[in-house]
Amino acid sequence: MKTYILAIDQGTTSSRVCAFDQDGRLAFQAQKEFPQIFPKPGWVEHNLEDIWESVRMTLKEVAEKVGAENIKCIGITNQRETVGAWRASNSEPIMNAIVWQCRRTTDDCAKLRKSNVANKITQKTGLVIDPYFSASKISWMFKNHPEMRKREKSGDLKIGTIDTFLLWKLTNGQSHGTDVSNASRTMLMNLKTLDWDDELLKIFKISRSVLPEIKSSNSFFGQTQNLDFLPNGIPITGILGDQQAALFGQGAFSKGEAKCTFGTGSFILLNTGTEIKKSKNKLLTTVAWRLERQKAVFALEGGAFVCGAAVQWLRDGLGIIKSSSEVEALAESVESSEGVTFVPALTGLGAPHWDAEARGLICGLTRGSTKSHIARATLDAISMQNADILLAMQKDSGLKLKKLRVDGGATQNKLLMQIQADDLGVPVERPKVFETTAFGAALMAGLGCGLYKNLDQLLHLVQIDQSFSNRKSMKLRLVRRQSWERALKRVR
């Protein structure tokens, strides 16, 4: 009889449930999208019931395929900073969840950045003050929904990120918990104590009583109860934020190992071991994970706003390709961009530049420039943005990158992966398991329930599909970097 781990991967636009067997093979998966809500320009919300329904349906579908009696445990990974509030008495949402993308607290954060507590917040949390993180969203909820304070006083209020809400629903309200990786994204957890910080709670006017208990990532979080699609008693033994789950699913367990997720933007995490590395280059310090009875593992994190979105712009904005998959062949039809440089600051520049006012630029055009050169320059730009972040990470950490693990849709573009290896001067490795985020949650849950004994055992389950080796000399790499840096100066 086969044993399966179910991994719930609750994302920004859809929920996916994957069933992995004990050997780490993906057996079945189901996915369901849910509505995006845009009440005002810059505001993004999700209905918590919509999220739960998408998870319920996909869980039911996968459980029917593998047999509920064969499910050993459940892991959860999730969109991280999105936060919701619900009634403890009946689990009904008080309002829509405020999504990580939402910018409604921009003015509140601007005031905080100018205040005398700004440095203290960053020192304690490793984060920059930004609407991205959960704390200012929760403060906004309390300011704009008087019912929240009333229910807080009566003990009928629960608040949490999406992992916490799903845990609450799966356990029929018996467990109100989260793990350290998700808690580290709220701007309310102290990186040193790995607990909610009383001073931060006071700054944001949030009571500890409404927040979940922070646990290690492979803890026993609770067990299924009173569900119509799963039997009682299935343990939930792994929780990780989505980017940390991808790092874990890539087997990047050692200090100095890094992963890049190529999506609409790119998300890069570098494992810095058990030491908290504070960034001098505008990167974020975050908890990667913490295993029971062990010290927490930390990471530096940085992201570029426009990665796959640059290719989408070639398709939708310029119309030079009909589908995103065409960009590889078009870019490969020329040896190089012939001096054309594209800085895809279409929504500003992310880490390590953090320039919201920067705008996109294409320079170096001649009469001989074609759409092929622009396509090539686009792939170069995606790679160079990631190289900027990884160079900053190496400066901050004092660690030398030996290889980069990659995941996400754009990793199917072999030319892009080769360009990335050339720009970094290190191998780029793409895994066989494409659903790396769900895989990471499954591995963590497997550790938590005792199916796996240690990280060495997990490493045998992480298999590489293809490795791309550097083919460029240091001199050529330096020339490309100088050209990129000249272009960057023009947009800032």
Image (cartoon, rainbow, N blue to C red):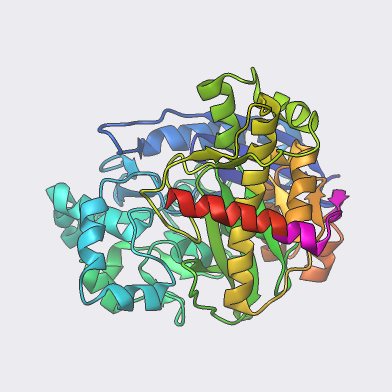
The span shown in magenta is 463-478
At which x and y percent is residue 349? Answer: 46, 51
Q: Is residue 470 above or below residue 215?
A: above
Q: Residue at x 60, y 45 (%)?
A: 8
Q: How many marks?
A: 0
Left or right, 460 with respect to 352, comes to right
* Nearer-the-camera pick, 451 or 142: 142
Q: Residue 41 magenta-drawn?
A: no
At which x and y percent is residue 34? Answer: 47, 29
Left or right, 115 with respect to 64, comes to left
* Nearer-the-camera pick, 482 or 247: 482
Left or right, 95 with respect to 196, comes to left
At which x and y percent is residue 55? Answer: 53, 37
* Nearer-the-camera pick, 480 or 268: 480
- Visible residue check, residue 223: no
Screen quadrant of the N terminus: top right
* Nearer-the-camera pick, 335 or 116: 335
Q: Quadrant of residue 310?
A: top right
- Visible residue check, residue 158: yes
* Residue lying at the far front of the rendered structure: 367
At which x and y percent is residue 233? Answer: 60, 52
Q: Which residue is drawn at 33% across and 54% down?
A: 131
Q: Which residue is drawn at 81% across and 37% down?
A: 335
Q: Residue at x 67, y 36 (%)?
A: 63
Q: In this view, does 456 lie above or below 417?
A: below
